[in-house]
Image (tube, rainbow, N blue to C red):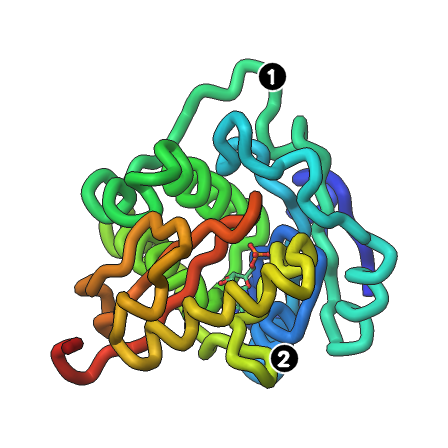
Amino acid sequence: MKTVRTAADLGALPGSGSVGLVPTMGAFHEGHLSLLRAARAENDVVVASLFVNPAQFAPGEDLERYPRDEDRDSRLAEEVGVDVLFAPAVEEIYPPGFQTWVDVEQLGGILEGEHRPGHFRAVATVCLKLFNLAQPDRAYFGQKDAQQVAVVRRMVRDLALPVEIRVCPTVRDEDGLALSSRNAYLTPEQREAALALPRALQAHDRALLDGLDVDYFELADFEPRVLAGAVRVGGTRLIDNVVVEREPR
Ligand code: AMP
């Protein structure tokens, strides 16, 4: 595996066959690894990006304390067969004078977008930039972030980007909690409280969130349709969703 830090070096890699890109913010868990394995199975070359995108964190969010461990991520990426780890510095993605943004207006403004203004503008922009740099045939995203998938798909259609979006199922811990880099912030008591989110989603029963700080618990007409929720447990904000086949109670 080769670690590349500049856009120029990524662009200069010799091309040979299909490219699968897995955009990540690192702190790898089995959710990330499932995307990397899917990319490995379907492409000749697998590129994983490791970039904690400052623009997608609002002031007061967890940008500074977001878990970072490039050595561990690098080892895990190599183990699952990643060919290129793209780990750019912030200035590589946002060069001085940067002022061009992609805004998926309506889809990026609801649910998460309502509670994290500007979040999806930053997500869409960084994804477009990564697509331009890595030139992937396929890009891999997790159903865990269902709205992110919807936003990226919309951008790909609207701007006719030559990339296929592949979506992998949400990976959960044995207790049902969706894996997330942010789970590391939870104390054992908070983790127990956080289990209400997957349980409420599974049961389609908002009442199971009573006592928690709920940002939203709503049906979303993505493809597929999901029931999506976001809660705050202590200082940690968690999101999750389940695919919905029927009307919730
Ligand atoms: P992140 O590093 O949190 O930005 O996530 C990188 C990618 O991994 C995104 O496409 C996420 O949707 C995906 N991902 C994160 N957690 C999970 C999970 N528990 N199951 C499946 N995919 C996930």
> In the image, what residue type sits under mark 2?
Arg
Name which residue type carries label 1: Pro
Q: Is residue 203 above or below residue 77?
A: below
Q: Kindly indicate the quadrant of the structure image that contains residue 9.
A: top right
Given residues 130 and 51, the one toward you in this image is 51
Q: Residue at x 39, y 30 (%)?
A: 101
Residue 11 picture location, percent across and down: 65, 47
Location of mark 2 (residue): 37
Q: Nearer the viewer, residue 193 or 152?
A: 193
Quadrant position of ligand 1? bottom right
The mark that comes first in sequence, 1 or 2, is: 2
Whether 112 is drawn above or below 176: the answer is: above
Please tell me whether mark 1 sits on a helix, a strand or a loop. Answer: loop
> Could you say where residue 171 lies in the image, as x and y percent from the top left?
54, 78
Q: Which residue is mark 1?
A: 96
Q: Is residue 22 left or right of residue 144?
A: right
